[in-house]
Amino acid sequence: MRPDAVRGHLDGLILAVLESGPRHGYAIIEALQARSGGALELPTGTVYPALRRLERAGLLSGAWSTVGGRERRTYTLTRAGRHTLGMHRTEWAEFSSVVEAVLRPAGPTTASGS
Amino acid sequence: MRPDAVRGHLDGLILAVLESGPRHGYAIIEALQARSGGALELPTGTVYPALRRLERAGLLSGAWSTVGGRERRTYTLTRAGRHTLGMHRTEWAEFSSVVEAVLRPAGPTTASGS
DNA sequence: ACGTTATACGTAGCCTGCCTACATGTGCAT
DNA sequence: ATGCACATGTAGGCAGGCTACGTATAACGT
């Protein structure tokens, strides 16, 4: 899958992996990769800024902690984030059905066409 | 649906509507709208440049004609375009299944969780 | 002791590509 | 002659993910 593909859907994906519980950035990247069967290999330069953006937007709340001598920033879905996730899912449903409707037909120019 | 949503998928959508036969730009816009149940209202400033881009890329071939005193540029899917459409469909299938896999789970934090 | 890999976070700048706004022209109905 | 549907196009803006880089600790092999 070409790297740019998630454009416009990144936020929803991140919110989704946080729905099942708080996670820190690195773990989010791994969860994304795991849930997608290895297809999603998002670079840190994509995820970390997105996390900060989502936090600034009030959809996530972040907190520092030190585990095994390493600094972690753990993010938790806020109420607003949960709400936004719902909207992302709705939008995805609509979007995917539209794309499918246009892309799928595989127009039978043969059958009873024109 | 927010206007920007088709980002990255426009080419595939256009190629798809041309699969069932040649069409001119204006008709492509209308076909896109019709097939999507009115959800896709792509502005001319989005579609026309895309058409030229796809033509330059060799995926479409365009030809001028005059119908009812009006100039039309009719686009036909080339062999390469048909091939590329197939790739777009494959990519869409992979992409959508990935997004669905990540977005869908709606993680049951209740079952055996915490 | 030293190098490499995994863990963990972050920023700067680029580039792609759709959108907004605008420009141009014909045919037809009022 | 005014307005709308038809028909095509360009210029510039902007969002947002990517590449490349920078920092730091822990674990492991040799």
Image (cartoon, coloured by chain):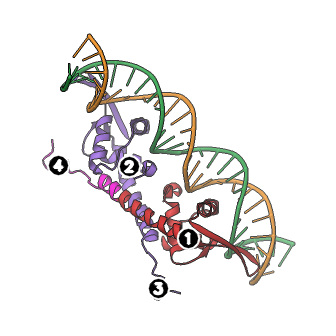
Chain colours: A purple, B red, C orange, D green
Q: Which SS class for mark 1?
A: loop
Q: Residues within 10 Å of mark 4 (few under 14, many from 20)?
A: few
Relative side of A101 to B54, left or right: left
Mark 1 to mark 4 CA distance (whole Å): 53 Å
Can you name the residue that lies furthest to the left here? B112
Give the number of the disc on residue A12. Answer: 2
Q: Amino acid at mark 2?
A: Gly
**Residue labelled with disc 1:** B78
Q: Which SS class for mark 3?
A: loop
Mark 3 to mark 1 CA distance (whole Å): 18 Å
Q: Amino acid at mark 4?
A: Thr
Can you name the residue that lies furthest to the bottom here? A112
State the extent of the magenta-drawn residues as a range: B97-114
Q: Chain of mark 4?
A: B
Q: Amino acid at mark 3?
A: Thr
Mark 4 to mark 2 CA distance (whole Å): 22 Å
Give the number of the disc on residue B110. Answer: 4
Q: Which SS class for mark 4?
A: loop
